[in-house]
Image (cartoon, rainbow, N blue to C red):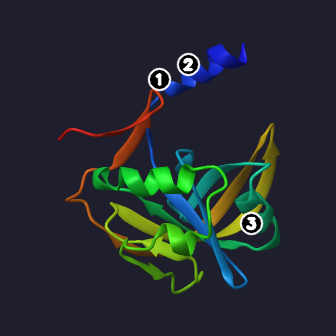
Amino acid sequence: MSELFTEAMAQLAAGVAVVTARDGRDDIGTTVSALMSVSLEPPLVMVSLASAGYLNEVLLRQDRWAASLLSSEQAAVASRFATPGRPSARLLVAGTPHHRGEHTEALVVEGGVAAIEAETTKVVPAGDHTLYLATILSVPYVDASLRPLVRVRGRYRTTVS
């Protein structure tokens, strides 16, 4: 049943983002396709992370993080952050325009369709994942002229106008 469930969910297109956090002197991050808007008032988002992942471990200790919503030109960035055993996020963004979030100090990848900084308000264990409900602290940029990167059927794709 789990294989069939995985295949069924792969039919649903989802936006691709990189979630990052500063962990002391290090930076960490991972690619996600489970980031969604929850509320406009107050502005809330939710992200789902694998419970066994290191980013999940860090976000259980600290509340602030950033998400860079990637553009169709950033599939390579998504792949770098999705690779198992990846190095520090600082190495993953080398050569890619980025800055530190004003409120989170997390790495924010530039050149995407948007970026947010958030603060976790509720953590919900959910099977082999953990859900983070978070208040938006800032929106560093939005570039509606770019096409978002999406994941569908196990591949990164671009949307059409």
Question: On the image, numbered disc 3 is attached to which residue?
Answer: 59
> Tag 1, which secondary structure?
loop
Residue 29 position in % (x across, y down):
60, 63
Q: Is residue 76 above or below residue 112?
A: above
Q: Is residue 108 visible?
A: yes
Residue positioned 47% across, 50% down in the render = 79
The spot of residue 90 in percent (x, y) is 54, 75
Which residue type does callout 2 highlight? Ala
Whole-Å distance between the Cαs marked 1 and 2?
Answer: 6 Å
Q: Which of marks 1 and 3 precedes in the sequence?
A: 1
**Secondary element at image label 3:** helix
Which residue is located at x 64 percent, y 19 percent? 5
Q: CA distance from mark 3 to mark 1?
A: 29 Å
Q: Read off the residue under disc 1.
A: 11
Q: Nearer the viewer, residue 20 or 161?
A: 20
Residue at the (57%, 84%) spot, across then down: 103
> In which quarter of the view is residue 157 placed?
top left
